[in-house]
Amino acid sequence: MTVGSNSAAQQHDAYSMPIEDIDVSDIELWRTNSYWPYFERLRREDPVHYCKESASGPYWSITKYKDIVAVDTNHAVFSSEAELGGINIHDRASELRLPMFIAMDPPKHDAQRKVVSPIVAPPNLAKLEGLIRSRAAKILDELPRDEPFDWVERVSIELTSQMLATLFDFPFEDRRKLSYWSDVAAILPAPGMLVETDDEQFTIMMDCLAIFTDLWNQRVNEPPKSDLISMLAHGESTRNMSPEEYLGNLILLLIGGNDTTRNTITGSVLALHQNPEENRKLRANHDLIPSMVSEAIRWQTPLAHMRRTAVQDAVIDGKKIAKGDKVIMWYVSGNRDETVIENADAFIIDRARPRQHISYGFGVHRCVGNRLAELQLSVIWEEILKRFPVIEVVDEPVYVPSSFVKGYEKLMVRLPS
């Protein structure tokens, strides 16, 4: 089975409507995992596409690999600044338009990123590997046999929330708050969603800030340590942050530390279930784990897009982008661009160039924690392969209704004894 395969009805809908009416940010497409043929059509017919009406207002879609790289590496023209709109297609309420280093342009971005980058430097990753392995083993050993359970809840969230608690030196017994805050921060409030209004989202984020402010106040009065809060509290370019900027950077680190790993852990289980020949390859040759991890990160693309705002007029692929326009880099589409990645819709764990993907972004904003994500994914699969000859997916996945975080709310599986 190939990834991104579509029903005839989805193909018909995507190709029958006038192309100017396509809105790939429509939440319903993401809730139903039916956006693939729309991106396929845009890449073929209108790779720099203008949507004049959407729930998030007008925007440009950049859908091909090389155009995405061009935008992502040109921060002088395409800005990430929070005050211009930041990194998400959705225009946040003013009180939630928070400064964070990913939503800053150089040089301020570079100075703040440098403060936290030591936590994912190779020496620290080497120290973390044993801890990740022991936790992964415990989580897997406690899973039920011969009965359905939710892999997202029991494995993906648990492993990533434990790691977040370690990175922040956050009270371990309260670790699920971290993944909850990440989910709340990333979602667009709407009826029936995790949070339904901007006010509700703001209240929860203020609760998050209050708890982290207490931790800041503890750490700032202690000698510097190697956790993220201590790094921010003592860092030259972060120690005088406003509360809003502190919360913005917390949200960035929570989402970055949570969603990439969590949703790719789940996505890799689904991908191998859907592609039994690749599953056989992996189980026959565990040396393919690093390559499989990179392919799973491409296949999953756990953050579907990043937004930029044009700060001057520009031209991309012949299209005139006006100053002030919202420009969306659809990483999920760039990772399916067959002009760059051969057989891009297929999940192939032994590709010649498995790291050729744009799930981490490009340029100065490239994901700071990518090596930690890969380490966690590699370790969890090393431990899975020791224990479980089969992971049966027993129901259709439930997808996160978001065009930003591309992930799973639930994946029911069964482990035969």
Image: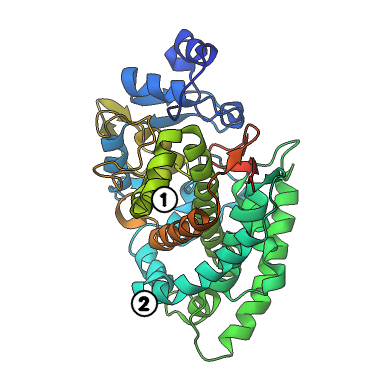
Q: Say which mark, if any, is on residue 185.
A: none
Q: Element under label 1?
A: loop
Type of amino acid under label 1: Ser
The answer to whether one can see residue 197 in this image is yes
Q: Residue furthest front?
A: 417
Image quadrant in which the N terminus is located: top left
Q: Position of residue 48 (x, y in %)?
A: 34, 27
Q: Return the residue at label 2.
A: 123
Viewer-proximal residue among 349 and 353: 349
- The residue drawn where x is 63% and y is 82% is 217
The answer to whether one can see residue 325 in this image is no
- The residue drawn where x is 35% and y is 35% is 334
134 relative to 143 in the view: left or right: left
Image-quadrant location for residue 407: top right
Are the two marked residues, 1 and 2, in contact with CB atoms closer than 8 angstroms? Answer: no
Q: Return the residue at label 1.
A: 80
Q: Position of residue 108 (x, y in %)?
A: 38, 65
Image-quadrant location for residue 310: top left
Determine whether 223 is above or below 333 in the image. below
Viewer-proximal residue among 163 and 403: 163
Viewer-proximal residue among 124 and 76: 124
